[in-house]
Image (cartoon, rainbow, N blue to C red):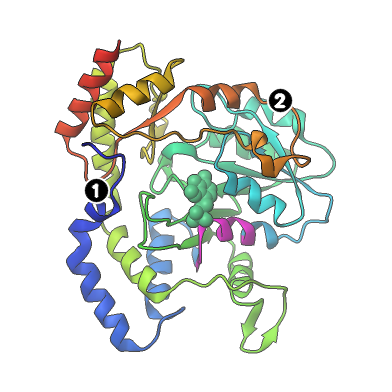
Amino acid sequence: MIEYENLGKLNEPFFEAYKAVFEKILDSGWYILGKNVATFEQEFANYTGTKFCVGVASGLDALSLAIRCFEFPADSEVIVPSNTYIATILSIIQNGLNPILVEPDIKTYNIDPTKIEEKITSNTRAILLVHLYGKCCDMDSIISIAQRYNLRLIEDCAQSHGSKYKGQIAGSFGDFGAHSFYPTKNLGALGDAGAVTTNNEMLAEKIKALRNYGSRIKYVNEYIGYNSRLDEIQAGFLSIKLASLNIINEHKRKLAKLYFRNLSNEFIKPDVHEKFYDVYHIFNIRHPRRDQIREYLLKNDIKTEIHYPIAPHKQKAMKGIIDGNYPISEEIHATTLSLPISYFHTEEDIYRVIEILNSFI
Ligand SMILES: Cc1ncc(COP(=O)(O)O)c(C=O)c1O
């Protein structure tokens, strides 16, 4: 069986280092927001080329706190891609703001910059973009729109650790980069964890307060804050993984190359362009007979996933919140299939997936 993901196997190369850091933290008696968190924050800021990083409890919290920081008025609108994981949209709703969905580019799966301006109104305050599947958005066009309309820019980097646009790393373009370290991510912890990156010291300090009950000084509360602190143990694990993130990303890129070179052109493969350094959190193909292909692969002992089977605007939870038609998103959701591409997969695994997929044709 070729599994889609296996967190045990994915983390096996790091087990010894994890055990050593776990024992150290266990003995230290300090478990939340300590030395390990501060060290990881510094390392991740350095990695992303930003000045500040603030560790939080999850990717959703990273997004929510980033939006929260700006204290937008209640009727504000935030531009967001219609093709994303639900968390991106939830972070806007949880702040009492209105998500305004913009369709993706069918080739890159990321927000289509040519469709943003028509959605901007006098209530628009921010663009929350998503570097989906491990590919950066078209940043020059988006930054120029944000500047022209004086909008805040927040990057959802949950799927894009280490991905680059013109050599610059995701999470360093906007006011904030919001990162998830959910275990399956390219930089994954062994539980929930997240972080916010920024070049703005005042914003970083505010996020630090917001993650800790709105407090900078113990028992003094400046803001309506959250409890969204990063554990020492997760931070310790993340420092270990971060040291290998480039190796993990390169491994995924090597496997992606095999798909690109050998998969039949019957399958629509991800877009590749020299401006982008893609890290393939997800390697997807598209095909009108997606469900049959998935079944065929499973019969041949190959597991796949769908990211995502239901478009956000079609979710029951979004009834009355999001309306309108998003045909490009629906087309993607109906035809996309995510193929195995984890750190533990070997070239042989990928050749096997290719062989079976090509035999479907
Ligand atoms: C694009 C995107 N944004 C946000 C999140 C939320 O991250 P977390 O699960 O750490 O809250 C995810 C997680 O899967 C995601 O894929």
Is residue 199 one of those drawn in magenta? no
Q: Secondary structure at mark 2?
A: loop
Looking at numbered disc 2 in the image, what kind of residue is underneath it? Asn
Q: Which residue is mark 1?
A: 247
The stretch of residues the image draws in magenta is 55-65
Screen quadrant of the N terminus? top left
Say left or right for 192 vs 21.
right
Q: Secondary structure at mark 1?
A: helix
* For marks 2 and 1 on the same chain, the one whose residue lies earlier in the sequence: 1
Q: Is residue 79 visible?
A: no
Query: Horizontal and vertical percent for residue 326?
Result: 66, 26
Residue located 59% across and 73% down the image:
227
Say left or right for 144 vs 323.
left
Residue 11 placement: quadrant: bottom left
Residue 266 placement: quadrant: top left
Query: Horizontal and vertical percent for residue 39?
Result: 38, 72
Q: Nearer the viewer, residue 294 or 355?
A: 294
Is residue 60 one of those drawn in magenta? yes
Query: Horizontal and vertical percent for residue 51?
Result: 49, 62
In front of the other: label 2 or label 1? 2
Residue 202, relative to residue 150: is it above or below?
Answer: below
Q: Which residue is mark 2?
A: 325
Say left or right for 55 vs 272.
right
Residue 77, relative to residue 20: is it above or below?
Answer: above
User: Which SS does the magenta portion mostly show?
Assistant: helix
Dot 1, crowdedness within 10 Å: few (<14), some or many (≥20)?
Answer: few
Q: Is residue 350 visible?
A: yes
Residue 55, relative to residue 299: is it above or below?
Answer: below
Looking at numbered disc 1 in the image, what kind of residue is underneath it? Ile
Q: Residue furthest left?
A: 348
Query: Horizontal and vertical percent for residue 207?
Result: 60, 68
Residue located 56% across and 47% down the image:
155
